[in-house]
Amino acid sequence: MSADPTHACENEPWQGRAILHVDLDAFFAAVEQLDNPEYRNKPVIVGGDPTRRGVVSTCSYEARAYGVRSAMASARAAQLCPHAIWATPHFDRYHEISQAVLAIFREQTPLVQPVSIDEAFLDVTPGRFGEEHPVTVARRIRARIAELGVTASVGIASSKTVAKIASDFDKPDGLTIVCPGDERAFLAPLPVRDMSGIGPKTAERLHALGIRTLGDLAALDDATAREVLGSHGPGLALRARGTDERDVRDNDPVKSVSNERTFSVDVRQPSEIDVALDRLTEKVGQRLRRKALAGRTVTVKLRFSDLSYRTVRKSLAAATNDEHVFGPVARQLVREAWTPGVGLRLLGVGVSGFQERAEQLDLLGELDGAPAQPSAGREDLVRGIDAVREKFGDGALKFGRELKVPPDTGTPRRD
C-alpha cells in the first residue's frame, strides 16, 4: 500500500485479478506546459476568462498549491492565484495525447475501459493475456506515458473500486499498490466521500449517523445499509469492504453525448439563445457522427440567473445524429422551459437512447408529428458540412443569424 521503489507484492506471484486505474495528472494543464516550455513549473489554469463568468477546467499542481481547484469560478481562482498563467483550452491537442496514451494501454492488454479523456481501467491479470507481474506492467505504462511528456498516477488492486481510490493516493506521478487481501485494511481509514457513488448528500446523511469512514460503512450489515442508503446500500457497503466484481469492459457503451455552455453574461434574448443553441447542437451532431451513434432522446438543460435548474426531454420517432433534425426539437424544448426576459446562465443539449444505425429524419415530418422518413440527401449534406469544418475549422460555415450576434465567450464543458 505504498509507492516505494520496490514493493513486497513484486516479490511474490500476484493472486487473483489485477486491475489498474491510470489517471493522467492535471492533464489539460500538463499538455499546456508540455507545448509551452515557458509555462513549466509555473501555475497554469485552463478555463474561462477570469474577468467574465467562467469556471476552471483544470489547473497545474503549482496552481493547486494556492487553493485553485477544477470547477472553481474563474474569478475566485484569479483571486487565489493572481499571477497564474491562463491558458485557452486546446481540445484537439488533448485528444491527440489521450489517443496516444490509449494506444500504450492497448499494447499491454486488450481489456481497456476509458472512463474519460484522462483516465482508464485496465485488466492486467496474470495468465489472462500475459504472464508479467502487474506491477511490472504498471511501471512500464508510466514510463511510456512519461515519454509523451506528461505523467500519470496509477493504482493497482484486485478491483476497480480499490484501484481508482489507490490512483489518487500518491499524486502526482505516483504508483500505489494494494496487495490482494489488503483491500479492506487499505480502505478502512478513508473518508466515505473517497469512494465513487457517494456524493455530498449521501455523505452528509452518513455523517449524521456517525458513519464517517469506509471502515464504518463496511461494518454495516445489509439490512442497516439498505435502511440508511436505500436499495444501493448493501452494494456500497460491500465495495467499502474491498469487494467489487465489476469487470473491465472494453469500449463501454456511451450513454449520451452532450455539450453545454456557461454564459459570460446572463442571456435574455431569444435570438442570442438560438445562436448558442445552434453552436451546441452542431457540436453534439459532430460528436455523434464521429462516434457513429444516433439517438432518439433529446435533452435540454437550463440554469437560470437564480441558479435554479430545469431539464426537459423529448423522444423522436427514430434515431438521428443530424443537428438539423434534433436541433429544432431542442429549440422547442427551450421555448417550453424558458420565459423570455428571464436570465439564462447555462444551456446544455444532449442526445441519448442510441441505436447502432442512424436513420435520418425528415424535418417537417418530425415537427408535424407525422412518421419520419430517412433522408439520404440530408445525410450527404451533413457529411459535407462536417468535411468543410474538419478542413477549415468550425467557423467556416455559419447560420445566417450567427453573423449578427457577437460570439459567446462563456466556458464550454466537455462531455
Image (spheres, rainbow, N blue to C red):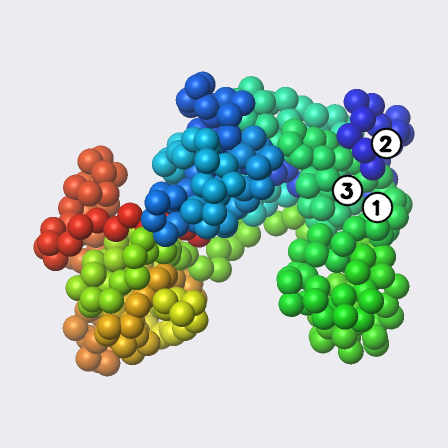
Kindly identify the residue that appears in the image at 30 percent across and 68 percent down: 343
The image quadrant that residue 179 belongs to is top right
Quadrant of the image for the N terminus?
A: top right
**Residue 27 rendering spot, x and y as whole percentages:** 52, 35
Quick check: 198 left or right of 35? right
The image quadrant that residue 334 belongs to is bottom left
On the image, numbered disc 1 is attached to which residue?
Answer: 186
Q: Earlier in the sequence, mark 3 or mark 1?
A: 3
Residue type at the position of mark 2: Cys
**Residue 201 rendering spot, x and y as whole percentages:** 65, 67
Q: Nearer the viewer, residue 27 or 267?
A: 267
Kindly identify the residue that appears in the image at 78 percent across and 30 percent down: 3
Kindly identify the residue that appears in the image at 29 percent across and 72 percent down: 342
On the image, numbered disc 2 is attached to which residue?
Answer: 9
Residue type at the position of mark 1: Phe
Q: Earlier in the sequence, mark 1 or mark 2?
A: 2
Neighbours of disc 1 within 10 Å: few (<14), some (14-19), many (20+): many
Neighbours of disc 3 within 10 Å: few (<14), some (14-19), many (20+): many
